[in-house]
């Protein structure tokens, strides 16, 4: 139950919203991001902030609370007043996966957060470094077997969907693949570019520029269909690996207790931003499939995705740490 102070703050945000703004004019709207500046999520949030500001009639800033796979930012969202000042721009890992793999993440999404809007999906992908001779998924599997069936695969964070994808690939091909966790995609990609690690699994937005430059080779992608930016790259399903058809999502969340008119106003503004041609092109170039989902549809999408990965994680035998 919210304290009287939080309820009063929420009421203040609601009144400001009904007057024509999301929050008090002298208080900026914060978009929390759980990753450092310069990464894919940060770039996405900054585009949203730029476009949302005139629509909301208020200053919109990006606040990076990096660390622990978005856990720090999620805890900050939980602690924020539900008054329309604070929203969380995040992908699936923090909301759908972290609570399944961490015993005490410091938040419970269903209790502490409210979905606002979904705005994109993206694909994770398996890529090989320039020093690895493989150019296709089959050649990569054959190369690992030529190394005694053992190899390492970089992942952006421990106990993330890429880690479980490594296990699925290993089990399907009877390989001994060891996931090597990094603190985000940037250091993982740097090691791949330096041939310090032969392969990695990360998001297409984090891999696509080096794929275009020929420095990395993406050999398989998650999803039911091939990616528009990578029409030549097969999906894992095409390669016989089932269970990776559900694509990760991006969305916006607010603290539980945020007044519904505030959520509706922000969600409506998101719909207008996502209809802008320059935004759609910018996100498409990052490997995102733009698709606005209003609150109820986004909540259903998040729930289904969480249930899907709950099955995968439990089947893997992983024990929350």
Image (tube, rainbow, N blue to C red):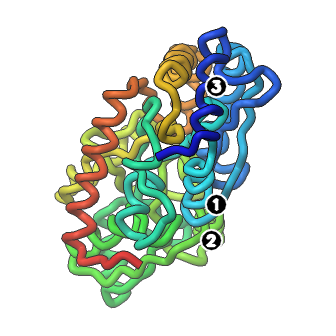
* Picture mark count: 3
Confirm or deny contact between disc 1 and disc 2 (CB under 8 A): no
Q: Is residue 135 visible?
A: no
Residue 58 drawn above or below residue 148? above
The residue carrying mark 3 is 13
Residue 171 locus on image (x, y percent) = 22, 75
The residue carrying mark 1 is 186
The quadrant holding residue 164 is bottom left
The residue lying at 59 percent from left, 31 percent from top is 10
Q: Nearer the viewer, residue 225 or 313?
A: 313
The residue carrying mark 2 is 191
User: Quick one: label 1, few (<14), some, or many (20+) residues within 10 Å?
Assistant: some
In the drawing, does residue 143 fall left or right of residue 170?
right
Instruction: Please identify, in this view, whether the residue under mark 1 or under mark 3 is nearer the observer.
Output: 3
The residue tagged with tag 2: helix, strand or loop?
A: helix
Distance between mark 1 and mark 3 Cα atoms? 37 Å
């Amino acid at each position: 139950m919210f304290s009287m102070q939080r309820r009063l703050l929420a009421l203040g945000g609601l009144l400001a919203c009904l007057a024509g703004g999301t929050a008090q004019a002298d208080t900026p709207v914060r978009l929390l991001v759980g990753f450092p500046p310069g990464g894919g999520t940060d770039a996405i949030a900054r585009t949203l902030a730029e476009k949302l500001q005139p629509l909301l009639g208020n200053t919109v800033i990006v606040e990076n609370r990096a660390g622990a796979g978005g856990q720090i930012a999620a805890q900050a969202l939980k602690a924020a007043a539900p008054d329309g000042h604070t929203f969380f721009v995040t992908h699936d890992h923090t909301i759908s996966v972290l609570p399944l793999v961490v015993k005490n993440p410091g938040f419970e999404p269903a209790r502490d957060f409210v979905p606002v809007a979904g705005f994109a999906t993206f694909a994770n992908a398996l890529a090989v470094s320039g020093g690895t001779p493989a150019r296709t998924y089959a050649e990569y599997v054959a190369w690992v077997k030529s190394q005694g069936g053992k190899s390492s695969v970089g992942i952006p964070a421990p106990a993330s969907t890429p880690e479980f994808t490594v296990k699925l690939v290993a089990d399907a091909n009877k390989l001994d693949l060891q996931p090597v966790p990094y603190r985000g995609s940037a250091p993982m990609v740097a090691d791949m570019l330096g041939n310090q690690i032969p392969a990695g699994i990360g998001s297409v937005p984090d891999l696509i520029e080096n794929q275009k430059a020929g420095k990395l080779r993406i050999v398989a992608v998650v999803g039911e269909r091939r990616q528009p930016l990578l029409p030549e790259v097969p999906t894992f399903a095409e390669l016989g690996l089932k269970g990776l058809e559900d694509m990760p999502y991006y969305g916006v969340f607010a603290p539980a207790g945020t007044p519904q008119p505030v959520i509706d106003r922000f969600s409506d503004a998101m719909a207008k931003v996502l209809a802008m041609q320059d935004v759609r092109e910018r996100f498409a170039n990052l490997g995102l499939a733009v698709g606005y989902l209003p609150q109820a549809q986004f909540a259903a999408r998040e729930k289904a995705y969480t249930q899907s990965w709950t099955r995968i994680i439990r089947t893997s035998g992983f024990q929350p740490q």
